[in-house]
Amino acid sequence: MVFKLINTHLLRAAAIVACATVLFGCQPTVDLRGNTPEASKLSQIQVGKTDKTTVTELLGSPSSVAEFDPNIWYYVNAKTEDIAFLKTQTLDQNVVKITFDKSNVVQSVDKLGMKDAETITPNPNATPSRGRQFSWIEEFLGNFGRFVSKNRPGGGSGGY
């Protein structure tokens, strides 16, 4: 009788722990990512006067530099939320875009927010690559020779 009573209590405790684990696993996780320039430091940047070195001293390195123009810097921050296995949601995003002229002096400072964001649909076509196209069986079988050492009689891989 005592053993049955202990089993019942253990089962209830295990059920409570399992339910609590599931509930806490579904709690949203909010992350702050990126570089948020302080308003006081951002206000010290003057168009036509401040140079790249001073901007770096005030704000730090940029989050990103434009791919085709190294004179455009972006300071990006985002607040995101993850819930279990669902897609990450962006709750808020701010971008400070600083453009420099050819003499490395600030030309413009633009602040962008979520309202300025645009949805980009990636092109589903694959980028063609030059060279021979391998079948899946050729790719699978082609890797076997990489793991056999030619210097060791027994073969095998390893760095010793």
Image (spheres, helix red, strand yellow):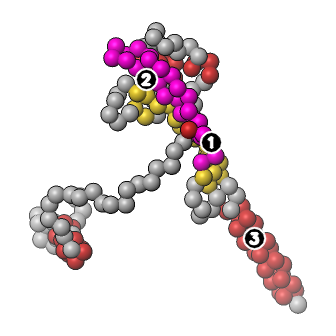
Tell me the magenta residue range.
90-115
The residue lying toward the viewer, choosing from 14 and 93, is 93
On the image, numbered disc 3 is attached to which residue?
A: 19
- Residue drawn 51% across the image and 22% down it: 109
Residue 83 located within the stretch drawn in magenta: no
Mark 3, secondary structure of its residue: helix
Could you tell me which residue is drawn at 73 percent across and 65 percent down? Answer: 23
Tell me the SS state at disc 1.
strand
The residue identified by callout 2 is 99
Q: Which marked residue is nearer to the observer: mark 1 or mark 2? A: 2
- In the rendered image, is residue 67 in sight? yes
Does residue 33 appear anywhere in the picture? no
In magenta stretch: residue 106: yes
Q: Secondary structure at mark 2?
A: strand
Q: Give coordinates of residue 79: x percent, y percent.
A: 61, 43
In the drawing, does residue 93 fall left or right of residue 145?
right
Q: Is residue 64 left or right of residue 102?
A: right
Q: Mark 1 = which residue?
A: 92
| x and y percentages locating residue 70 in the rendered image | 35, 28
- The label shown at residue 83 is none
